[in-house]
Image (cartoon, rainbow, N blue to C red):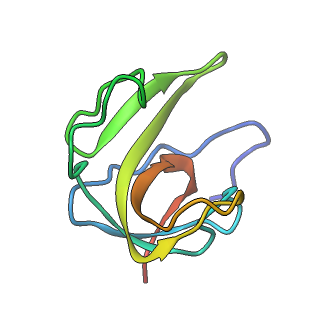
Amino acid sequence: MELLEGMRRAPRIWRVGDRARVSLAHHWARGAAVTIARPAREVSPAEMTEAFADCGRVVPGRARMFRFHWVVFDEAQWDSEGDGPYQEAEIDADFLEPLG
């Protein structure tokens, strides 16, 4: 079924252990294979303003809510500024695709 312009797909429900790939449209870690996970350590309030519940968190935006998931990369990733390598990170759920 084709979406009409401006419509969004219902978000996929990701669970700990699910396998995914970061979309090629994402701003970093493009195409990286990942496993959905819980943060390995407590993420400090200085790093995040909204708390993680299980493997994700919801962050209010101007026009809508954004869902992020914690992922573990199959291969460590460097960001666009050359920082890293990162073994894990949070990725906007809109940019996670089922692996396989």
The quarter in which the C terminus is drawn is: bottom left
Q: Which residue is at 56% across, 46% downward?
A: 9
Identify whether 64 is placed above or below 13.
Answer: above
Report the side of 88 relative to 7 (left or right).
Answer: left
What residue occupies the far right of the structure in this picture? 5
Can you give x and y, in whole percent of width and height, for residue 26 in the image? 66, 58
Report the side of 54 relative to 26 (left or right).
Answer: left
Q: Which residue is at 31% across, 29% downward?
A: 44
The answer to which of 80 and 32 lies nearer the viewer is 80
What residue occupies the far bottom of the structure in this picture? 100
Marks counted in the figure total 0
What residue occupies the far top of the structure in this picture? 62
Q: Which residue is at 41% across, 28% downward?
A: 48
The quarter in which the N terminus is drawn is: bottom right
Identify whether 72 is placed above or below 58.
Answer: below
Can you give x and y, in whole percent of width and height, for residue 54 in the image? 20, 41
Can you give x and y, in whole percent of width and height, for residue 22 in the image? 54, 66
Identify whether 30 is placed above or below 62.
Answer: below
Report the side of 78 relative to 17 (left or right).
Answer: right
Can you give x and y, in whole percent of width and height, for residue 47 in the image? 42, 31
Report the side of 97 relative to 50 (left or right).
Answer: right
The answer to which of 6 and 31 lies nearer the viewer is 31
